[in-house]
Image (tube, helix red, strand yellow):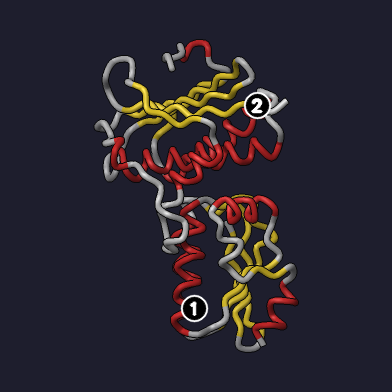
Amino acid sequence: MTFDMVMKGETALIALGGEIDLQHSPTVRKGLLDCLLEKRGIVVDMAEVAYIDSSGIASLVEAYQAARKNSTYFALAAVSPPALRVLQLARLDKVFTIKASVDEALGEAG
Amino acid sequence: MSVLDPALALVRLTIPACAECLVEIRAVIRKAAVECGVSKEDAGDIVVAVDEACQNIVRHAYKESSGMIEVSVFCRNERIIVYLRDFAPAVDIAKIKPRPLDDLRPGGLGVHFMRTIMDEVVYLPPPDGIGNLLVLMKRIKA
């Protein structure tokens, strides 16, 4: 699993990669929530996510809810087919803001 | 549903119940599903369902203790059947329920994934009365 963050203006661009499972989801959760503590908007690039399970999805849900509480931007971008499938199974594809590309998400984040 | 003889399984794997071990279970299930003739898309879904079931064994059956998971995959009558056997205290099946999806909160999705993906998810009595035997079955599309 990889978790790489770069700042794009006031927005944190977080690129996730590999398999986000029970072993690795605590790292993802902490990384996302730490960003939100600093009231940064977040774009999560999920293009290289090969697998995500319910614990990984739970980390995204927790970050999404924290972002809403903070009134900060939170979007998923370029979601890989296996990750999108799991979001669809959880019926979260209609809950999260999901953008086709990172550029589109960063553009909206402002 | 009668209990199948693990000796007749396409694949058998005995592995510690730990978060770090799930990656190996997923790889075995994906390979076995493809060998059974399951489509790539359905194989991916079955991997999700079995992974969630194994997570439940790690987190809720064994909790803080250690133990083993026995995975057996059967391919018969155009069905893929996965047995997950653990040796933890018997789970209270009545407490295993998916949460409503409109209740947006972290967690609680694993049972929903299992039941949505698989055609049957049942607990059978383990042969020697020890632990739990979860069976997940999915029909293989022609």
Q: Where residue B49 appears, x then y in whole percent?
A: 52, 39
State which chain disc 1 sits on: A
Give yes or no for contact between labels 1 and 2 (Cβ–Cβ under 8 Å). Answer: no
Residue A40 sits above or below residue A78 on the image: below
Badge 1 local density, few (<14 within 10 Å), some, or many (20+)? many
Which secondary structure lies at badge 2?
Answer: loop
Quarter of the image with the N terminus of chain B is top left
In the image, A26 versus A98, the foreground residue is: A98
In the image, B43 versus A32, the foreground residue is: B43
Which secondary structure lies at badge 1?
Answer: helix
Residue B132 sits above or below residue A106 on the image: above
* Residue pictured at 31% horizontal, 38% vertical: B61
Write down the residue under mark 2.
Answer: B140
State which chain disc 2 sits on: B
Q: Amino acid at mark 1?
A: Ala
Write down the residue under mark 1.
Answer: A67
Left/right placement of residue A44 relative to residue B68 reads right
Q: Where residue A70 appears, x then y in whole percent?
A: 46, 84
